[in-house]
Image (cartoon, rainbow, N blue to C red):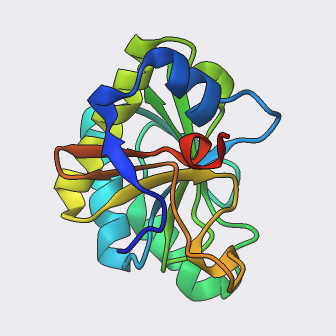
Amino acid sequence: MKHSVGSVDAAAVSWEELRQNVYEVDGTWRDIYVLTSTWEDWETWSAFVNANYRVEFIDEHEQEHDQINFTEVWRCWELNGNYLNSPKATVFVGDIYVHCRFFQKEVIENDINPQQINSYAVHLQLMAYMTGLSRALGKEVVLTAENDTPSTCSPYWEWSPILAVNNDQIKVYRHWADTAS
C-alpha cells in the first residue's frame, strides 16, 4: 500500500512525539485497520485474540462469552445482511481495551482510546498486539485517526495512516513534521 507522508522507524520517534502526535488526547479514538480483509482474515483474527488475550464477546442476543465465537459472527453476517445488530468484542491488550464491532467483512476494524496509551510501556503493548496480528495475517496493520480510511480521503491527497506495522517492521508517518514550519 502506498502512503503519501514519509515514514520513519518507530524506534526513532520519542515517547513525547508519540504521545503528542500519535496518541493525542483530542476527544477522538484511533482505529486499527486491516484493509481488504476476508472472512478468513476475520477468522484468523478471532483465533489470534482468543489464544493470546482475555476477551469479552457479546453475541447478537447480548449474551457475554469469554471467547469470540466466529461461527456466530459469520451467521450474523449471512442472516442479517446489515451489521447494526452485529456481535461485539473487547480484547484486553495489557492496559488497553481494544474494541471491535463486526460491521463489515471487508475491513477488520478495532478501536482504541488514546487516553489509555499513557506511557511508552503501554505503547509497546499495542505494538505487540499489532505486530502479532500482522504476522498472523501476513498483512499490514495500520493505526489511523478515527474513521480515516483511503475511501474517506479527498481526491486531492493520498491517504496515509499514523502508524503501520508490517510483520516486525513498525513505521510512524510523521504528519506533524510535514506540516511544521
Q: How many numbered marks have been drawn onto this rendered protein structure?
A: 0
Q: Is residue 160 above or below residue 154?
A: above
Residue 58 visible in rendering: no
Q: Residue at image x 63%, y 70%? A: 103
Quadrant (top left, top right, bottom left, bottom right) of the C terminus: top right
Q: Residue at image x 69%, y 61%? A: 147
Q: Position of residue 73 (x, y in %)?
A: 50, 67
Q: Position of residue 58 (x, y in %)?
A: 61, 48
Q: Is residue 127 above or below residue 167?
A: above
The single residue placed furthest to the front in the displayed view is 181
Q: Residue at image x 38%, y 74%? A: 2
Front residue of 90/135: it is 135
Q: Residue at image x 57%, y 14%? A: 118
- Say left or right for 143 vs 23: left
- Say left or right for 170 vs 21: left
The single residue placed furthest to the right in the displayed view is 27
Residue 32 visible in rendering: yes
Give residue 84's quadrant in the image.
bottom right
Q: Position of residue 57 (x, y in %)?
A: 53, 45
- Say left or right for 85 vs 142: right
Front residue of 139/144: it is 144
Q: Position of residue 155 (x, y in %)?
A: 68, 86
Quadrant (top left, top right, bottom left, bottom right) of the N terminus: bottom left
